[in-house]
Amino acid sequence: MDQRAIDDERTLRFALWGALQTGDGPDAVDPAVLQQMQIYKGQRGMFADKVRTMDLSDDGSGVVVALRHTGLVYDDDLSDDGIIYRYPATSARGRDASDIAATKNAAVLGIPVFVVANSVSAPGRRRVRLGWVSEWDDSTGQFLVVFGEEPLSAPSLPDDDAPFAVTEARPTKQRLSEQRIGQAKFRFDVMRRYGPSCALCDMRIVDVLDTPHVVPVKSRGTNDPRNGLVMCATHHRAFDAHLFGIEPESLELCYPGRGLDALSLHITVGSLAGLGKSPHPDALIWRWDYWRKYARV
């Protein structure tokens, strides 16, 4: 591994990022420009440019240059401060494994990557962000990429007995390198805390799993993963609609009547005790009082 070559590649990517600030800026880049700059060539979701980067890593997989996000399937994974990027799962398993390794190499070597999404302001053009592969989770097949011009050390999952605040102040917009890691990391950490399975049924397909806040964002609920749960889309909607509550001490599920029960909601558990881990007690108490008020029980 040649440290000088690694430093040169890092310098090159910052130079390319600087060049993208000119003209229409990084929010409306012509795809042809990305090809000319060898940032992204459009063949696959992950572009590693093996010719240029293969010798940077010991495994020969190179270092990913760009990650393409089309928004056609995982639109919610992209936020202002980062993205959860899914491992590829195609018929070309060897190529997929190499792309995954190349993306991990970007994290290990401290080399930034480009995230290429569809432009919001200019159809047919691309919105580009510079980011850092912060974490990955093989069990869920996901990378966490944090946007910014400087790498941010993502804090590890908090211990269950660590200090916990039910709510938190939402930060104002700042330059990318100063932004806190927010919604993308929350989803990543909640999924890692509980595993890829709905807390209320046997749904285990990551593509249809959500990570709702126990204390909602609209009430300034914290992005601490102990303020989250994993639920399928159906039960997330039921949770938001106050169709069931979680008794904070026993973790038993409760229903407001009106014909609503576990059977009608297709809930297959009686409590959350079987999860192994549970949301923080303070978050559960807040949500219980909130549910009793709005469900009128």
Image (cartoon, rainbow, N blue to C red):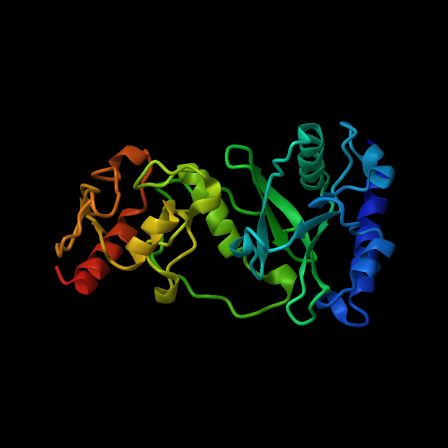
Is residue 174 among the parts visible in the rendering?
yes
Which quadrant of the figure contains the N terminus?
A: top right
**Based on the displayed image, in which of its 4 quarters is residue 34 positioned?**
bottom right
- Viewer-side residue, 146 vs 202: 202
The answer to whether residue 157 is seen in the rendering is no
- Nearer to me, 263 or 273: 263
Query: How many numbered marks have been drawn onto this rendered protein structure?
Result: 0
Give x and y (percent) for residue 54: 82, 34
The answer to whether residue 255 is left or right of residue 124 is left
Quarter of the picture containing the C terminus is bottom left
Q: Residue at x 78, y 51 (%)?
A: 40
Position in image of residue 244 (x %, y %)? 22, 52
Q: Position of residue 131 (x, y in %)?
A: 67, 53
Q: Nearer the viewer, residue 143 or 41?
A: 41
Which is more toward the observer, 130 or 84? 84
Say which residue appears at 51% left-offset and 37% top-offset: 140
Q: Is residue 87 left or right of residue 27?
A: left
8 versus 116 height, above or below: above
- Image height of 214 relative to 275, above or below: below
Left or right: 78 in relation to 164: right
Locate residue 72: give its quadrant: bottom right
x, y (%) of residue 106?
A: 71, 41
Tell me what residue is drawn at x 61 percent, y 61 percent.
178
Q: Quadrant of residue 27?
A: bottom right
